[in-house]
Amino acid sequence: MHLFDNIPDTLFNVLSSPNKHIYVDCLFIIYDATNSIENAFQGERSFVIDKLIDYFDELKEDFNADDDMAATPRQKSVAVINILKQNGWLGEEELGDYKTSLNLFDYSIKIIDLLKRIQVGEESEYTGEIYTVYSLLSSFDILDGLTIIDQAYKKIEDVLRKLKTLKANIYRYYFDLVKKQKKDDLQNVLERLLVDYKTNFFDSAYYHLKTTDSLPRYKRSILENISNIYQNDSFMDTMANQALEKRKALEFNDAYNYVEMRIRYIKNSIDSIEYLIDGIDAKNELYINAAASKIMFLTNTSEDLDGLMNRLFKVILSDKKIGYSQIFNLFRARNLDENSLQSVRRPRVDAVAEAIDYDQDISDEVKERKMANLLKANIFSKKEINNFVAYILGENNKILASQIELESNDDFVKLILIFLFSKSIGMIYDVKLLNYDTRIGNIKFTDFEIYVKGKRL
């Protein structure tokens, strides 16, 4: 069966129309107007039109309906309802006493509900999801066996879907930061990192997966319980018969396969969840490292080559009329004949390892430079952030972020990573966001408390 066997071919026309913003607003209004228990989730036509009239009274955009006679707010409201009916979003029903109701179809409600969640930026939470699966399987009763398996299946399916969405969401932040060709100043990067990313990633979703609803806490028990159910022939036969009674299948073998498929899915998905969480960790590290690099670039005003190039790029990007020929001597060159300086392909030759000369003379300056490069590559690792926190805490159990002395750009980036790494595995500390702002230099942010895990009063 194809998708358009269940929905009209013209359903999405309103979402690609020049008036798509207005149509979506009207769909939301109709959705809210028909979402009333008192009216049995159906909107009386006159009531819905009154709501749309209020919208068009305040609308400042031009609305060019197909009906040229739609001039007044009421005419525009009626025109929108007719367009939505023609494209399959709405149905109309006679209620008697000269009253008519407007009803959204099942697929319309699903699509509008999704659009509303996208508009408000609703983020998924995972509080109790994995624990629910653990509880269902731990208290398994064969009298409700199929119902329990179906509920556990749906919960696991929901968790996987949300985790995939979360992973894709992190990539969206990374794409916006690194891939999009747009100018970013330090304030924008910090706001996305410490406000938007922190709120949508750590607070609403990720925190519970790494703490209270952590998979390792329940994985072993879930796998043991689901294996015991699967290996019990009596349980499997009983649940197959329950599937027949509930018309999940027409024959016993199909019913048995239905139950078996769900049990296998639950078992296999537990490992999939673990891999997904590892992938999310990797995406998170990638985004944080990219953000740290960008912050270092935006704050680099040193006199070394990096700092000079940074200031040079800022001058070039800020002045559209600058003459690049005054700075760079660039020209286009082409190799046109066989005697040109092109790279000639050579046959592949396997490399032969040479013995290391341990007696070669390497100056102290070269050694120090190599060591500095190695240390710089690891300066923002979790291990170094742990060491940095241990150093600034000293004998204390807690400290405010605003109390930390920041002597360099590296220290400033470390302060940001302290906050972002706080929920990662293996960190010796945790943080608590406070309800007031503070300022370090030109950077304003919400202050937070850094404390040793298990020792906060």
Image (tube, helix red, strand yellow):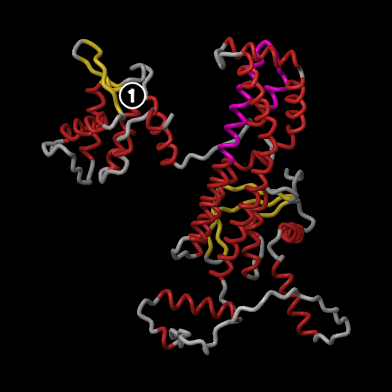
Instruction: Please give the name of the residue rendered at 32% of the width and 41% of the height, measured from the top-left corner.
Output: 15
Vertical relation: 395 (above or below) 330: above
Give percent across and percent down for residue 62.
Answer: 20, 46
Q: Residue at x 42, y 88 (%)?
A: 326
Report which residue position mark 1 lands on.
34
Q: Residue at x 73, y 43 (%)?
A: 457
Q: Nearer the viewer, residue 87 or 292?
A: 87
In this orientation, which residue lies closer to the viewer: 240 or 193?
Answer: 240
Q: Which image quarter is the N terminus in?
A: top left
- Residue at left offset 65%, top offset 30%: 265
User: Does 144 sit above or below residue 77?
Assistant: above
The answer to whether 8 is drawn above or below residue 362 in the figure is above
Left or right: 20 in relation to 75: right
* Residue count near mark 1 (Cα–Cα under 10 Å), binned few <14, some 14–19, many ≥20: many
Side (left or right) of 325 relative to 101:
right
Residue 237: image x %, image y %?
Answer: 69, 13
In percent of width and height, residue 220 lies at 77, 32
Residue type for callout 1: Thr
Magenta range is: 134-163
Q: Position of residue 420 (x, y in %)?
A: 63, 53
Q: Main secondary structure of the magenta part?
A: helix
Callout 1 secondary element: loop
Q: Is residue 413 above or below residue 92?
A: below
Q: Is residue 276 magenta?
A: no
Q: Is residue 108 visible?
A: no
Q: Is residue 386 left or right of residue 325?
A: right
Q: Is residue 22 visible?
A: yes
